[in-house]
Image (cartoon, rainbow, N blue to C red):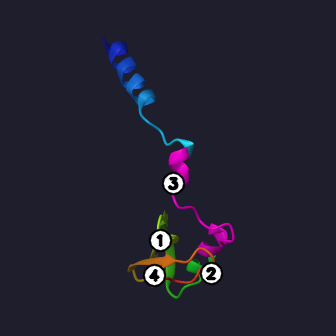
Amino acid sequence: MRSAAFILVAASTLAAPSPSGAQMRNHALPPENSLRLSEIITRVEQRDGFRFVDEVEWDRDGYYEVSYYTVDGAKVEIKLDPVTGSPRM
C-alpha cells in the first residue's frame, strides 16, 4: 500500500507542468548591460547601518527588490535599477 501511494505521489510530481522555453521568454529578464548581481549586493552592503541581506528578487517590471536588515534591527526594502544599481523611486 505504501509503495502505491509513493508511486502516485511521484507520478503526480513528475507530471506537474514546468515552465517551457516559451514561458521563460515571456518573463522579463535583466538587460544585457546590467551590473552583476554581486555588484548590486556589494552596493547594498555599503549602505549606512547595513547588517545582512534577507531576500533578493528580480521583479518583472525591470528591477531588483532587495530586503535587508540594519544593525538596529530595522527591515529595509529597496528597488534597485539593474544597470546603475541606484535605488528606484
Could you say where residue 20 lies in the image, as x and y percent from the top left?
A: 52, 41
**Tag 3 near tag 2, CB within 8 Å:** no
* Of the image marks 1 and 2, the number of the one nearer the N terminus: 1
Q: Nearer the viewer, mark 1 or mark 3?
A: 3
The outermost residue toward the left is 1
Could you say where residue 11 lies in the image, as x and y percent from the top left?
A: 41, 22
- Name the quarter where the C terminus is drawn: bottom left
How packed is label 1: few (under 14 Cα within 10 Å), some, or many (20 or more)?
A: some
**In the image, is 20 to the left or to the right of 69?**
right
Residue 70 falls inside the magenta stretch: no
Please tell me the numbered disc located at residue 65.
Answer: 1
Disc 1, SS? strand
**In the image, is 7 to the left or to the right of 1?**
right
Q: Which residue is mark 2?
A: 84
* Of the image marks 1 and 4, the number of the one nearer the N terminus: 1
Q: Which residues are magenta?
A: 22-41
Label 3 to label 2, Cα distance in Å?
Answer: 24 Å
* Of the image marks 3 and 2, the number of the one nearer the N terminus: 3
Please tell me the numbered disc located at residue 71.
Answer: 4
- Residue type for callout 1: Glu
Label 4 to label 3, Cα distance in Å?
Answer: 39 Å
Could you say where residue 82 lies in the image, as x and y percent from the top left?
A: 59, 73
Q: Which residue is mark 3?
A: 26
**Tag 1 near tag 2, CB within 8 Å:** no
Q: Which residue is located at x 57 percent, y 61 percent?
A: 29
How packed is label 2: few (under 14 Cα within 10 Å), some, or many (20 or more)?
A: few
Count of number-bearing discs? 4
Q: Nearer the viewer, mark 1 or mark 2?
A: 2
- Residue type for callout 4: Val
